[in-house]
Every structure is written in C-alpha cells, then in structure tokens.
Amino acid sequence: MQSNFVFLQNDFPVLYQIGIIAEKYLYTDSNVCLIKLGMFGETVVNIMLQLDKISAPQTGI
C-alpha cells in the first residue's frame, strides 16, 4: 500500500518521514501516532514561517 504522504517526499522530506512513522503506528500504537501527527503539524508551521520569512515567536518572555 502506498503512503498517503508520498507527495511530500521530494519537496518536504522531513514531513514525509514523520508522516510515514505516524502511518506505521496508526493501528499498533495510537499514542505514538498522535505524537507524530503533532510533530507533523508543528513542522508544517515552522516550514510556513521559513517560507514566508517570518521569525518564530519568542518564548519565555
């Protein structure tokens, strides 16, 4: 079965790898799957900030 994230493989390999791991654990360890999907979302936001040349918000201020 082909991954749902294969379209990301060339342009966003980091997202592709995280997505593959999330799919791998979908039925065997749902907690790991959710953690990886959270990482996926965070990575998407970070990539968007980089592409739009926006600095990430400072924490701890």
Image (cartoon, rainbow, N blue to C red):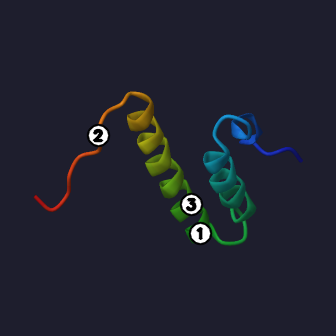
Q: Secondary structure at mark 3?
A: helix
Task: Give the quarter of the image for residue 37.
Answer: bottom right
Residue under the point 45% across and 30% down: 51
Amino acid beneath label 2 = Ser
Left or right, residue 35 beside residue 49: right
Q: Is residue 28 above or below residue 55?
A: below
Amino acid beneath label 1 = Val
Q: Is residue 26 above or below residue 28?
A: above
Amino acid beneath label 3 = Lys
Q: Which residue is mark 3?
A: 36
Residue under the point 49% across and 48% down: 43
Circles 1, 3 touching at the beta carbon (< 8 Å): yes
Say which of 57 and 31 sits in front: 57
Q: Which residue is mark 1?
A: 32
Q: Which residue is mark 2?
A: 55
Q: Secondary structure at mark 2?
A: loop
Task: Give the quarter of the image for residue 8.
Answer: top right
Residue under the point 31% across and 33% down: 54
- Where in the figure is residue 5, as x and y percent of width and height? 71, 42
Would you call the spot at circle 2 few (<14 residues within 10 Å), some (14-19), or many (20 or more)?
Answer: few
Say which of 30 and 6 sits in front: 6
Task: Specify the farthest residue to the right.
Answer: 1
Residue under the point 23% across and 46% down: 57
Q: Which mark is residue 17?
A: none
